[in-house]
Image: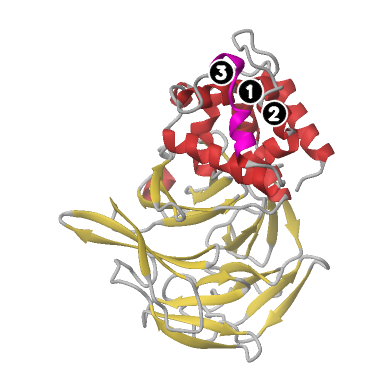
Amino acid sequence: MLGDQCIIQALDSVSSSSSAASAPDSTLSGELPSVSRNCVIGSLQVARAQKGGHVEGLVNCCHSKKKKKNRTGSGLWDSATKSWASGMGGDDENSEANMSELIGRIGRELAISCLLRLPRSYYYDVACVDRSFYSLVRSGNLYRLRRAVGIAEQMIYCSCNVLEWEGFDPCRQRWFGIPSMPPIECFMLADKESLAVGTSILVFGKRVESHVVLRYSLLTNSWTTGEMMNTPRCLFGSASFGEKAIVAGGIGQSGPLSSAELYDSEMQTWTTLPSMSRARQMCSGFFMDGKFYVIGGKAERHNEVLSCAEEFDLENGSWHLIPDMAQGLNGGSGAPPLVAVVNNELYAADYATKEVRKYDKENNAWITLGLLPGRYTSVHGWGIAFRSCGDMLIVIGAMSAGGSGVIEICSWVPNNEQPDWKIIGTRRSGSFVYNCAVMSC
């Protein structure tokens, strides 16, 4: 549970800014969907019970004096929303309720605790309740508090059509849309790379003479120009942890790179890190056991395929070479190694044999577990995605069906048995997965 001082500061910050904030966008207005209403009330009840209180007491305190005769339905919710507005955003001249009802009864700390436990896919539905809650969502403070108490949800974002992205909530198995990218020529005609970090998605592209970065913000649901790296590059290895990410290697203006950079999504800044021992492009990156790894790729000379990996220790800022860690993985003529980490265990998808493998840390070797799902459109590994999502491995593929494209998302929770892939999402879309990123916040 968050400390009182942290909670009060967060609420005071939002309350002070909400008086000057504009009303929510028109897309957030209107009656709150019943599923969101029930979800919020359920969160309140759970949080109340966890504090040792009674659920009935919480429900009863959601009525304003004027609505006491109506104990169910919209009267309950109307009173609750008035309490939120008064308690978090100051007095409202149109509101007869004040924080003596909901906030006064459960306390400010518990109120925030309820919001933190609400599934974030409902945040913008609920933001229409009150200007202060809307400001809390848009400012990013709610996501910072979630990180502070270790609450995180994974959302999958993929692009199967030029400039278009689609989102998928794996827990509720529902799709949602986000705005299309601006029509910049390099993103329409050439390869692009993506990276989810914090509450943002970065998409990297290369013009004829320069690089370009676009940034999607979950807070504003919009695309803007992102900050350029200190050393612009493409075909690099990357991975994120919380609100930070590391990119390493890739190809720059003069060829393959050994340099690495740290991105802070809160500050939107890039910091140069120590360089790797080997320059490499078309490599992959991941975090495991608190360290960042770069694996595979091609070397600087003679198009050499690298079987080694490098491990970066964030505490002492040094790289360690691991020979043969990529031995037996795809590389060279196809896509970078398709790797993902679940519970600090490394897995790889072999797009040539259509097998999934697990890395044996003790013996520095790969063990074949079984087959990958489906027959998806792929060109030497390009066009499919292999990601981790919480405790699941995710394979996203596309295929042509009935004159159009279909995208499928398959999941499997790794265990000691052969992979048993389940289809958790299907949608008509493009027939090729250009990009994929998993946002955790």
| Mark 3 vs mark 1, CA separation in Å | 18 Å
Q: Residue at x 56, y 19 (%)?
A: 68
- Residue 283, x across and y down, in percent: 55, 70
Q: Residue at x 77, y 27 (%)?
A: 12
On the image, which quarter does residue 298 sit in?
A: bottom right
Q: Which residue is mark 2?
A: 103
Q: Nearer the viewer, residue 184 or 140?
A: 140
Taking the magenta stretch, the answer to whether it contains residue 358 is no
Amino acid type at mark 3:
Ala
| Mark 1 vs mark 2, CA separation in Å | 7 Å
Q: Identify the mark at residue 83; answer none if there is no mark.
A: 1
**Circle 2 SS class:** helix
Front label number (3 vs 2): 2
- Residue 32, x across and y down, in percent: 46, 28
Q: Vertically, is 331 above or below 29?
A: below
Q: Is residue 164 visible?
A: no
Q: Nearer the viewer, residue 354 or 422?
A: 422
> What secondary structure characterizes most of the magenta part?
helix
Asked if labels 2 and 3 touch by Cβ distance under 8 angstroms, the answer is: no
Amino acid type at mark 1:
Ser
Asked if labels 2 and 1 touch by Cβ distance under 8 angstroms, the answer is: yes
Mark closest to the chain's N terminus, 3 or 2 = 3
Label 2: how many Cα within 10 Å (few below 14, some 14–19, many 20+): many
Mark closest to the chain's N terminus, 3 or 1 = 3
Q: Identify the mark at residue 342; answer none if there is no mark.
A: none
Answer left or right for 174 relative to 213: left
| Mark 3 vs mark 2, CA separation in Å | 22 Å
Q: Residue at x 49, y 65 (%)?
A: 387
- Residue 304, x across and y down, in percent: 53, 80
On the image, which quarter does residue 27 sit in?
A: top left
The boundaries of the magenta stretch are 56-67
Q: Identify the mark at residue 23; answer none if there is no mark.
A: 3
